[in-house]
Image (tube, rainbow, N blue to C red):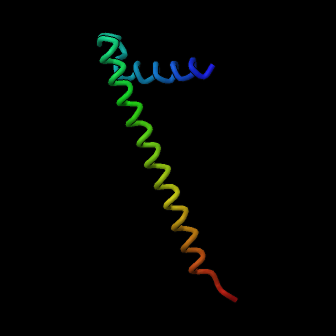
């Protein structure tokens, strides 16, 4: 079941890079893999930025808290 889901996910990226199916299969797969990697790196960057923002926000709240 996981293999089918993975194949469908990859097919999505293959369709994004070659909607008309004009490229050779090998080239389409390479481009899809690169697009997938780019997509995952963008998600990782957004996640890191969100974590950093939350950490900064929490630290700011701690430093501004009234100790009494």
Residue 22 at x, y percent in the picture: 30, 10
Q: Residue furthest right?
A: 68
Where's the C terminus, which quadrant? bottom right
Say if 52 sits above or below 18 in the image: below
Residue 8 at x, y percent in the picture: 52, 19
Q: Examine the image and state in which quarter residue 59 appears.
A: bottom right
Residue 33 at x, y percent in the picture: 38, 27
* Residue at the image position 43 percent from the left and 49 percent from the top: 45
Q: Examine the image and state in which quarter residue 17 appears.
A: top left
* Relative to 7, 37 lies left or right: left
Say if 38 sits above or below 61 in the image: above
Q: How many marks?
A: 0
Say if 48 sits above or below 36 in the image: below
* Residue at the image position 38 percent from the left and 37 percent from the top: 38
Q: Examine the image and state in which quarter residue 2 appears.
A: top right
* Residue at the image position 63 percent from the left and 19 percent from the top: 1
């Amino acid at each position: 079941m996981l293999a089918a889901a993975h194949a469908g996910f990859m097919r999505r990226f293959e369709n994004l890079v070659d909607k008309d199916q004009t490229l050779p299969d090998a080239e389409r797969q390479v481009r899809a893999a690169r697009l997938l990697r780019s997509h995952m790196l963008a998600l990782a960057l957004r996640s890191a930025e969100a974590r950093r923002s939350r950490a900064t926000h929490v630290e700011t709240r701690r430093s501004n808290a009234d100790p009494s």
